[in-house]
Amino acid sequence: MFKTIATFGLAAMMFGTTATISVAQDAKPVKIGWAAWSDAEFVTKLAAKVITDKLGTKVELVQTDVAPLYQGVSRGDIDAMMMAWLPETHADYFHKVKDKVETLGTVYEGAKLGWVVPAYIPEDAISSIEDLAKDDVKEKLGNTVQGIDPGAGLTRLSQQALKDYALSDYKLQISSEAGMLTTVDRAMRSEKWFVATSWSPHWMFGKYELRYIADPKKSLGDAEHVDILARKGMKEENPKVADFLSRMKLPIADLEAAMFNAQETSYDEAVAKYIEDHPDQIAAWIGEEKG
């Protein structure tokens, strides 16, 4: 059900083991990095398609983990990344490279991290992270919070949440986005209780009836914005692409709908449909005059 995505390490950035979108042009390609998260995959592939088709510039997509992405942009091995979750989620990564990168713009605002449960769990049983301390809730959840990849900011914050809420007898199950989604899918089919780390935007809210539980201690942070970071000098060397990326903004509702479409079809088809359905938006992004 869930697509398998190959992951390349930092060596891929250095030695060119990348997925390439080609056009008949000799110019140096723009390297855009992304991690295997559904929102990052959609916005990155959408940007690549527009840059290729509308700006006539080659694009190389470099997939790796979060930490190597920040390192790659700061060292100039990658031109840009479109998934800097700030101010909290990626705070540690960003702090280390903030003087070596440039922020081009914010691709979407109002992003959210949190823990979710299925809607069939009564709210009087679980409405808050604090409720996970109840003995009967612990038993039904198997003392487990389903997590994602170890390098994710959400994982770091979730580990802190377990400490903040004195849930030392819980285990944060480190996995991946795909692993978390597989657990959610299986549990939903049998109406089994679970709590999982999640975020918005995500297509899972279009497929399953889920709800966030309250986080009164704000361990998982407040609303986030997702920024586009570029290596130093990228704006001067490729102003057309940099200007486009600085103008690229998506409403979260549109993004979630497109991500859900990508799961039902494919990311390539969802990207093509988004471009077809939003001509004025695309024109504004690339700086075309409306006539």
Image (cartoon, rainbow, N blue to C red):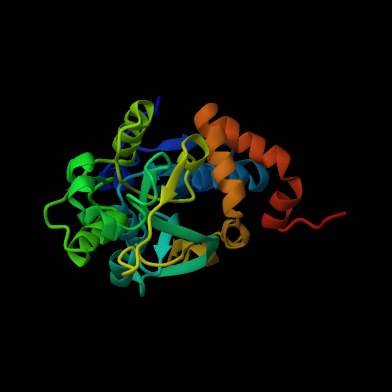
Image quadrant occupied by the C terminus = bottom right
Q: Position of residue 8 (x, y in %)?
A: 29, 40
Does residue 228 lie above or below 266 as drawn? Answer: below
Q: At x 33% / y 63%, what residue is drawn?
A: 220
- Which residue is at the front of the view, 248 or 31? 248
How many numbered discs? 0
Q: At x 30% / y 42%, what residue is drawn?
A: 12
Q: Answer left or right for 243 relative to 291.
A: left
- Which residue is at the front of the view, 251 or 29? 251
Q: Quadrant of residue 130?
A: bottom left
Looking at the image, the residue that sits furthest to the bottom is: 99
Q: At x 33% / y 28%, what residue is drawn?
A: 186
Q: Position of residue 28 (x, y in %)?
A: 49, 48
Does residue 81 lie above or below 174 as drawn? Answer: below
Q: Answer left or right for 135 relative to 125.
A: left
Q: Answer left or right for 108 relative to 160.
A: right
Looking at the image, the residue that sits furthest to the left is: 169
Q: Position of residue 33 (x, y in %)?
A: 41, 49
Image quadrant occupied by the N terminus = top left
Q: Position of residue 50 (x, y in %)?
A: 62, 45
Q: Answer left or right for 174 relative to 29.
A: left
- Which residue is at the front of the view, 172 or 257? 172
Q: Quadrant of residue 139?
A: top left
